[in-house]
């Protein structure tokens, strides 16, 4: 039973390493897996890293077929990428008798659906979110534009033709079940969230700051400050934290937005001495998280975000760190509030922020909170459980 996995994200990117390779390295143990990915020019130019990743993939037993990602001109470049991947996919289906095509997100699914029609293979739509609606909510496309209509047309075909639809959230599945065109043709849905390698993201080696009072209360922020993340609201929460805990500091781990971050911190009136801004690799992020008292991520509430599951929630909880998040984003509120592993903001006014920060500080002092966060991470975000779910799907599709 050969599987072809198609990702429009590159394996040289952090996301490819944590959300594609982490799974495939386990899944390949029971079947041959071919992987097509699209690598960006800047990443491909790093020859040493490219060779290291190639050795890593080959050593795991995965057959990698990297293609070059094209960006300009936008529509034509994507069309070219799709066509070259279909050609490679046809060759792989014929040469290796592919039985399952696992497509990550929408562009990959155009390719997978074409190959399904040609070879009658099984097709998994691993949707990763409401991609077309994200383009609208992120102000990248006009809602009445042709690009949105075309993307939604394809989305309908993906859902109607997929042998299995994998969603990151239960909230998104509930929404899709209400789609009129699916009534009478409901696909089989599965929820597999953004899982975390909890052997890496753990708290067993962390020093509890409640046992080491010389370390200040540390609020952690990890990742992008771009379109979807409300960084100014994050800074407002930190300012309130400093009002309640004057010695508190903000530890930010971010790859490429340091000038913007520094500017926003200065303009918000926060002392630079209370902020630590760093770059860290995957292992470095885990080590830093282990020394945080609480984590924060505030995401722009929008329709498309009901299908989103931020990776950092599982990472923080795996390290025993309670979180401050916001409502109307995937299943975040159900998990954080339902499992009592953090606080959820429903609005961003001063009173709401004050109450939320008070509750968060109180929660960090609660006996056994680290172990409880870790337990919740194991139940919701375990990479091993995610691998088991995909393995079961593969086996069910090819009896």
Image: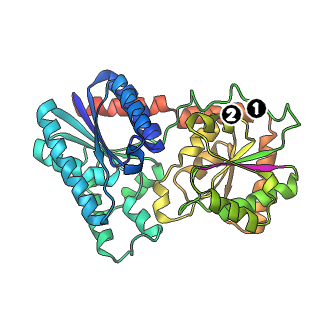
Residue pointed to by mark 1: 368
Relative depth, front residue between 248 and 128: 248
Please give the count of numbered marks on the rendered protein: 2
- State if disc 2 and disc 1 touch (CB < 8 Å): yes
Query: Could you tell me residue 398's position as x and y percent?
Result: 22, 31
Q: In the orientation shown, which residue stands out farthest toward the bottom? A: 144
Query: Could you tell me residue 82's position as x and y percent?
Result: 23, 53
Q: Which residues are magenta?
A: 248-254
What residue is drawn where x is 37% and y is 57%?
176
Assess disc 1: are there few (<14), some (14-19) or many (≥20) residues with their C-alpha within 10 Å of its C-alpha. few
Query: Could you tell me residue 159's position as x and y percent?
Result: 28, 53
Pick the quarter of the image with the N terminus.
top left
Q: Which mark is residue 372?
A: 2
Relative depth, front residue between 139 and 116: 139
Does any portion of residue 186 appear in the rendered image?
A: no
Judge whether residue 250 is colored magenta: yes
> Is 69 above or below relative to 73?
above
Query: Could you tell me residue 191's position as x and y percent?
Result: 42, 43
Main secondary structure found in the magenta portion: strand
SS at circle 2 = helix
Q: Is residue 305 left or right of residue 79?
A: right
Judge whether residue 80 is colored magenta: no
């Amino acid at each position: 039973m050969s599987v072809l996995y198609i990702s429009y994200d590159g394996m040289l990117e952090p996301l490819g390493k944590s959300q594609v390779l982490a799974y495939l390295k386990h899944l390949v143990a029971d079947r041959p897996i071919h992987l097509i990915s699209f690598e960006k020019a800047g990443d491909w130019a790093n020859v040493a890293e490219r060779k290291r990743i190639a050795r890593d993939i080959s050593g795991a037993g995965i057959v990698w077929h990297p293609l070059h990602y094209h960006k300009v001109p936008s529509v034509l470049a994507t069309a070219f990428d799709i066509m070259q991947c279909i050609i490679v996919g046809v060759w792989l289906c014929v040469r290796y008798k592919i039985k399952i095509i696992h497509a990550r997100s929408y562009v990959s699914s155009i390719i997978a659906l074409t190959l399904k029609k040609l070879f009658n293979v099984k097709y998994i739509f691993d949707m990763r979110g409401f991609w077309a609606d994200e383009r609208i909510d992120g102000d990248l496309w006009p809602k009445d534009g042709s690009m949105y209509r075309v993307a939604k047309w394809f989305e309908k075909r993906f859902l109607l033709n997929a042998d299995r639809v994998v969603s990151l959230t239960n909230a998104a599945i509930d929404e899709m079940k209400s789609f009129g065109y699916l009534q009478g043709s409901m696909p089989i849905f599965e929820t597999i969230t953004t899982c975390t390698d909890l052997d890496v993201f753990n708290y067993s080696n962390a020093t509890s700051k409640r046992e080491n009072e010389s370390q200040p209360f540390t609020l952690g922020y990890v990742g992008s400050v771009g379109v979807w993340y409300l960084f100014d609201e994050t800074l407002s929460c930190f300012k309130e934290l400093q009002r309640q805990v004057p010695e508190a500091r903000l530890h930010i781990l971010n790859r490429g937005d340091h000038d913007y971050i520094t500017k926003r911190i200065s303009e918000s009136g926060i002392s630079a001495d209370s902020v630590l801004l760093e770059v860290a690799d995957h292992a470095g992020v885990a080590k830093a998280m282990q020394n945080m008292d609480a984590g924060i991520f505030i995401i722009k509430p929008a329709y498309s975000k009901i299908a989103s599951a931020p990776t950092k929630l599982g990472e923080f909880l795996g390290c025993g760190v309670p979180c401050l998040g916001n409502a109307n984003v995937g299943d975040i509120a159900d998990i954080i509030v339902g499992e009592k592993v953090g606080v959820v903001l429903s609005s961003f006014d001063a009173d709401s922020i004050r109450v939320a920060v008070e509750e968060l500080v109180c929660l960090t002092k609660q006996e056994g909170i680290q172990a409880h966060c870790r337990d919740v991470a194991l139940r919701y975000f375990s990479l091993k459980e995610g691998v088991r779910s995909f393995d079961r799907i593969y086996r069910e599709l090819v009896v």
